[in-house]
Amino acid sequence: MDWKNWKKLNILVFYTLSLIPYSFGAPSKLQFKMDFVQTYQSKISKKEKQSHGELIYSYPKKIKIEMTSPDKIIFVSNGVKSWYYRSPFIEGEAGEVIISRGNEQLNTLTVMFDALNDLFTQGSGGLNQDALKKSKLFQGEWNDNGTVLTLTFSKEFSDKIKLKGALLRFQKNNPGLMDLTLLALQTDEKNLQGEFRVKKIESFSANDSQFEFVIPKNTKITE
């Protein structure tokens, strides 16, 4: 796949739009690991393609996204420093890494998960309906059987993360985060993009070292 086109398709997740300052209060600490499949349309062949990857998140401001196929892409952020790494297409060639530094510069998904922290208890506990009603960052609406939650972000929050809202689908009503089966990001008033089909999600005790990236040898570095 052409690297430039792939990068454009995934920009919501990995870089440019995601470099935004924001902070939240933090009563609990949400941590999880998720295996996912992202489906998108190739701009070259117009055929449906899939990317497979793993996401690790730890409240606040820490995330690691590793795409394992069709190309190896890694994004890591500890809230102060981030690394965006693309492995070489051909063995022996140099990989590329972009390093970003700044106070609380975050990825779009990181900011959204930080905002959702109050809704979910650590582990598989149910969603906090009271926190959903009181949130100043978004409004939530359930479908009839209580398995799909549509979030509409406030104007201030939307302007900061360049998203209008998100859709979360669960495998049962009265769900916890560990029941999540689909996450879709809304980029404008009509369209849902950046869909992540959850293959597996589980509570995960992450440590700070997992949000530091060790740059491989033979890598071009851009700062």
Image (cartoon, rainbow, N blue to C red):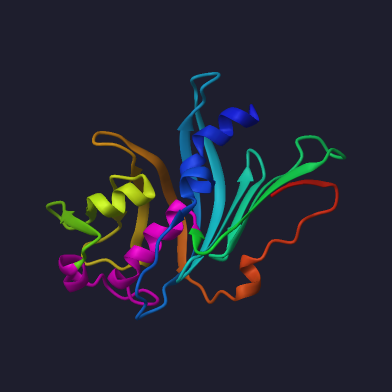
Q: Which residue sits at x=21%, y=67%?
A: 174
Q: Which residue sits at x=49%, y=20%?
A: 46
Q: Is residue 99 left or right of residue 15?
A: right
Please provide percent x and percent y for residue 168: 30, 53
Residue at the limit of the structure toward the top, as seen here: 45
> Residue 72 or 211: which is nearer the viewer?
211
Q: Is residue 50 left or right of residue 74?
A: left
Would you say residue 167 is visible in this rendering?
A: no
> Residue 13 or 22: which is nearer the viewer?
22
In the image, is residue 107 part of the stretch drawn in magenta? yes
Magenta span covers which residues? 106-134
Number of marks in picture: 0
Quarter of the view holding residue 24: bottom left
The answer to whether 50 is drawn above or below residue 197 in the figure is: above
Q: Which residue sits at x=56%, y=45%?
A: 52
The answer to whether 28 is drawn above or below residue 167 in the figure is: below
Q: Is residue 40 left or right of residue 97?
A: left
Please provide percent x and percent y for residue 17: 46, 44
Instruction: Please identify the dominant SS of the magenta region.
Output: helix
Would you say residue 109 is visible in this rendering?
A: yes
Q: Is residue 7 left or right of residue 89?
A: left
Residue at the limit of the structure toward the right, as seen here: 92
Please provide percent x and percent y for residue 34: 49, 60
In the image, is residue 79 part of the stretch drawn in magenta? no
Which image quadrant: the N terminus? top right
> Residue 161 or 70: which is nearer the viewer?
161
